[in-house]
Amino acid sequence: MDQDIIKQRVNDWYHTYSNDIYKYVFFMIGEHDQAKDILQDTFLRAYHNFESFQGEKVKNWLFRIARNLTIDYIRKKKTIACLIDSISSSKVTNKTPEQTIVLNETERELYDALRKIKRSYREVIVLRKIKEFSVSESCHILGWNENKVKVNLHRGMKALRKQLVKEGYRHETI
Amino acid sequence: MKQFEEMNEYDREFKSMNNKINLAQKEQEDILYQINNKIGRKSPTRRQVSPIWKYYLTLTVTSLIIIILSLPLLTNIIQDRTGNLNNESIHQQNWEVSPTFKLPVTFGDGTKGEYVLVGKEEKLGFLVGSGKEGEAAVQPIVKGKANKYMWHFWGSEEELNGDFKVVGINETGEREKVLLGNNEETVWNYGELGGSNNGADKHIPSSMVFPTSGLWKLEVYIGDKMFDEVIVHVQEN
């Protein structure tokens, strides 16, 4: 296919999905600038791998690319953080991202708790609850089967609640 | 059912969060600009390397690596088979016949005498003459004439442990077998060294023959390591 046509197609997709993808990445990593970089890389990768696009739902394909890039970033960051910790024993400061300023108190608590639970729980909650993808769409993006998506969502929600209690935001129900 | 009620617990907050977190219009446009910039720079001229081409390239590179890695091994094998060492003749000009040294000995009849060895004192040498004290004479080594020579070694148990091997190098740098085996054929090596003898830590009897006259360098190996070398002059007759 002509490169200009592919470029035009990617531009159209960008106009439609960029904000959604940005939100997904932001909820996953909590860093505005980094989320922007991943967003950019997602569309560059989509352009370069256009031939591997099998005519599936574009949104799912783009989210899958974004998810892979996000995981790569989280892994890299984890390794670097481990190295820094082992060298200087200094903790990486966890600044509140500018974006979260717009959230109200309950939402902020939820956001903070979400950031502290296991990555696999976080990603299924972000997709299913925040981005409101269906179970089958989530399966497609995550590469999981339906059962795994449901189980992880259930466990994730429990973990989220537990985290909120731990932080003192909620009281445990008897 | 409680499970599903719990599942919907934060739905309102989640929806609200999704609506509040947004990428500013300006930032969105900047990113798109950068994407298009990068696309314009890289891909239209992106060259596709055909798979068959890649295959041959990989094959060639792999073969080259294998050849380079196995070169030292091949050289060793060739040297072992042919006994040749091409650059040896370069060093030949600096060869100096090894000195002789004497070992005092008491013969069976109680008379005192001495053995004459060629090599390096307190290291290695083989017997080239014997006689009464002060009268021992060196017997010449003659081309093509097999003779018995008793080798003597001084050193630690560790460095004298292993098979005895002699590589003879003639003046043109050719590597030759000079040790004679049981069936009169020349061999590279014998077995392990024997115990102490005449004040030396180890010894081994040998028969040697040199096919040409002139200088011969004898590289002596014990086990895999070269122990030392002895240079002798082989006479025409």
Image (cartoon, coloured by chain):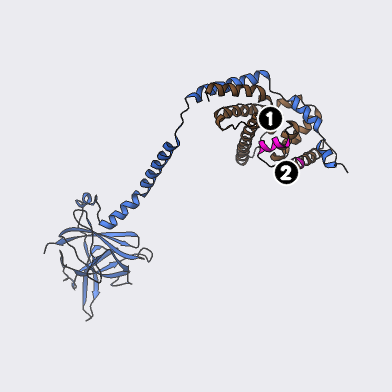
State which quarter of the image contains the N terminus of chain B.
top right
Q: What element carries label 1?
A: helix
> Of helix, strand and loop, which mostly describes the magenta segment?
helix
What type is the residue that disc 2 sits on?
Asn
Q: How crowded is mark 2: few (under 14 residues within 10 Å), some or many (20 or more)?
A: few
Closer-to-camera residue (A76/B26) = B26
The residues bearing labels 2 and 1 have C-alpha atoms spaced at a distance of 26 Å
Q: Can residue B72 be seen in this view?
A: yes
Q: Residue A147 carries which label?
A: 2
Q: Name the residue under label 1.
A: A26
- Indicate yes or no whether the magenta region holds residue A140: yes
Hey, which quadrant is residue B205 in on the image?
Answer: bottom left
Closer-to-camera residue (A71/A145) = A145
Query: Residue A100 location in percent, x, y?
Result: 74, 27
Q: Is residue B62 above or below residue A35?
A: below
Q: Is residue A32 above or below residue B159?
A: above
Q: What stretch is highlighted in magenta?
A: A134-154
Residue B146 located left or right of residue A46: left
Q: Are labels 2 and 1 assigned to the same chain?
A: yes
- Indicate yes or no whether the magenta region holds residue B197: no
The tint chain A carries is: brown
Q: What element carries label 2?
A: helix
Query: Residue B23 location in percent, x, y?
Result: 68, 23
Residue at image coords 59%, 32% = A54
Query: Residue A46 location in percent, x, y?
Result: 58, 29
Nearer the observer: mark 2 or 1; the answer is 2
Q: Is residue B200 visible?
A: no
Hey, which quadrant is residue A53 in on the image?
Answer: top right
Instruction: Pinpoint the chain carrying mark 2.
Output: A
Q: How many marks?
A: 2
Which chain did the renderer colour blue? B
Residue at image coords 81%, 30% = B12
